[in-house]
Image: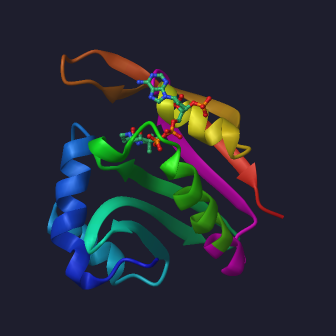
């Protein structure tokens, strides 16, 4: 379901628990105020336990981020979240979806492969992990229609 302005604190907390460089509440508030950006959440009861965000330009979009709360991972729940999000992107006229993923992020790579994304590029030394090591981003693509 679409995220609402009431979700920004939960979104920032979830992002901070999932990534080395967290996005703050203001960044999520900005995304929710933009018509070119879609943010969907997965809820358990009233709690936000997952989200996915994309930015649209013409008939292409980029997945900016996806994450589940750590306690919700490893059970395939992100597949339904992402599949439904791709349906909304298609409904907005998006034909092609791109994303960047860290080359060693096995859960994310498995998720994207399962949903039909294929590698189309590689950006060397794109990420820096908490220990300072530089790793590559793989650029993935999926055509929606
Ligand atoms: C990426 C993420 C959204 C995947 O969500 P999920 O629902 O936990 O994923 P799934 O349970 O569907 O598991 C995905 C695959 O990874 C595998 N997997 C899960 N944990 C794993 C691990 N620690 N090491 C290797 N493989 C793992 C699963 O077996 C599954 O493989 P399969 O499709 O071949 O069965 C979730 O792990 C997450 O929030 N990670 C932190 C944020 C992040 O890295 N986001 C992606 C940024 S590009």
Bounds of the magenta span? 88-105
Q: Is residue 95 left or right of residue 106?
A: right
Residue at 33%, 18% (x, y): give it.
134
In the rendered image, the quadrant that contains the C terminus is bottom right
Residue at 40%, 20% (x, y): give it.
135
Q: Is residue 6 positioned above or below 132 on the image?
A: below
Q: Is residue 109 positioned above or below 1 on the image?
A: above
Residue 22 is at least partly visible in this image: no
Judge whether residue 55 is colored magenta: no
Q: Looking at the rendering, which quadrant does residue 130 occupy?
A: top left
Q: Position of residue 80 (x, y in %)?
A: 58, 58
Judge whether residue 99 is colored magenta: yes
Q: Is residue 33 left or right of residue 137?
A: left
Q: Looking at the rendering, which quadrant does residue 52 occupy?
A: bottom left
Q: Position of residue 81 (x, y in %)?
A: 52, 60
Q: Is residue 104 left or right of residue 11?
A: right
- Number of dots carrying numbers: 0
Q: Position of residue 20 (x, y in %)?
A: 22, 37
Q: Toward the viewer: 62 or 9?
A: 9
Q: Position of residue 32 (x, y in %)?
A: 34, 79
Q: Is residue 13 left or right of residue 5?
A: left
Q: Toward the viewer: 23 or 115?
A: 115
Q: Is residue 19 positioned above or below 39 on the image?
A: above
């Amino acid at each position: 379901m679409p995220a609402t302005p009431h979700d920004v604190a939960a979104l920032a907390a979830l992002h901070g628990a999932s990534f080395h460089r967290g996005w703050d509440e203001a960044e999520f508030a900005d995304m929710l105020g933009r018509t070119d950006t879609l943010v969907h959440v997965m809820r358990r009861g009233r709690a936000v336990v997952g989200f996915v965000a994309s930015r649209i330009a013409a008939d292409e979009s980029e997945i900016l981020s996806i994450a589940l709360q750590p306690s919700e991972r490893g059970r395939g729940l992100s597949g339904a979240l992402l599949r439904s999000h791709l349906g909304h992107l298609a409904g907005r006229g998006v034909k092609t979806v791109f994303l960047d993923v860290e080359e060693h992020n096995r859960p994310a790579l498995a998720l994207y492969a399962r949903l039909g994304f294929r590698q189309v590029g590689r950006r060397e030394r794109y990420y820096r992990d908490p220990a300072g090591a530089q790793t590559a981003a793989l650029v993935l693509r999926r055509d929606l229609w």
